[in-house]
Amino acid sequence: MKGMNLMRKLTTYEILREELTRGIITKYSVTQFCKATGMSRGVFYNTYTGLTDLFCKSIQAEIKTHFREYGDCQSNKLIFAFLRQIGNDRLFYTNIYRLTRKKHTTHICDQINRTLFTEMQKHLFNSDYSNKHIKSMTNILLAHITNWIDHGCDAHVLDVYTDVAIILPKQKDC
């Protein structure tokens, strides 16, 4: 049953991605999402507290998947690949940023930062880095990513990576 729920959520996140990559979106509703997924509003609200929660969980799933796929890489390669993924999917991330910017920015940023910290903590488990150092690293990383998305991902991914590369530890080879 739990595997089935995970599979269903991955499908809903994929549908959300399709919905939010069609172009610049200024408004998006639960009704639109439910229509696209075939989910009833009741099921939606039993699963998520609202659109912001859906967006947040979608990004958290992206982060977890990315860290799982690049877990054996050096931190700098992992983060560069993550930034490249955001750059490739800039419309998706820009739309989520714009749709949540006015309402629940603090909540979604806190949740995403917590997930990023947890995944980086797992990645650096056998390193000499303290939780405080890892937390600082993820705070700086998220601030740069948010700023980059806020500016429409105009800067080249390599420029953003160069800004954050100095804070990244080097470890295992990929």
Image (cartoon, rainbow, N blue to C red):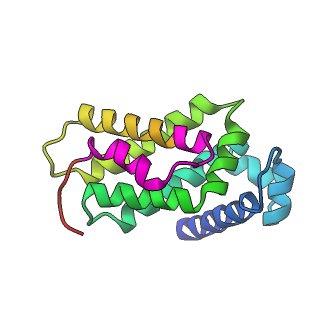
Q: Is residue 94 above or below residue 71?
A: above
On the image, which quarter does residue 66 sit in?
Answer: bottom left
Image x and y of residue 51, in percent: 72, 44
Residue at 47% x, 60% y is 84
Query: Number of callouts in the render?
Result: 0
Residue 87 vs residue 55, the one in the foreground: 87
Give the residue displayed 49% in from the left and 53% down from the top: 156
Quadrant placement of the C terminus: bottom left
Residue 147 highlighted magenta (yes or no) = yes
Does residue 101 appear in the picture of this structure?
A: yes
Going by the image, does 50 lie left or right of 27?
left
Left or right of 39, for residue 71? left
User: Does the magenta run of residues contain 160?
Assistant: yes
Q: In terms of depth relative to the viewer, which is nearer, 157 or 79?
A: 157
Q: Position of residue 165 (x, y in %)?
A: 30, 47
Picture coordinates of residue 41, whole percent (x, y): 83, 52
Residue ranking furthest to the left: 128
- Res. 38 image quadrant: bottom right
Q: Residue at x 38, y 57 (%)?
A: 80
Please say whether residue 49 is visible from this viewpoint.
no
Q: Position of residue 158 (x, y in %)?
A: 41, 54
Q: Residue drawn 43% across and 57% down? A: 82
Taking the image as shown, residue 82 lies to the left or right of residue 11, namely: left
Q: Main secondary structure of the magenta part?
A: helix
**Start-end of magenta stretch:** 146-168
- Look at the image and tell me in which quarter the N terminus lies: bottom right
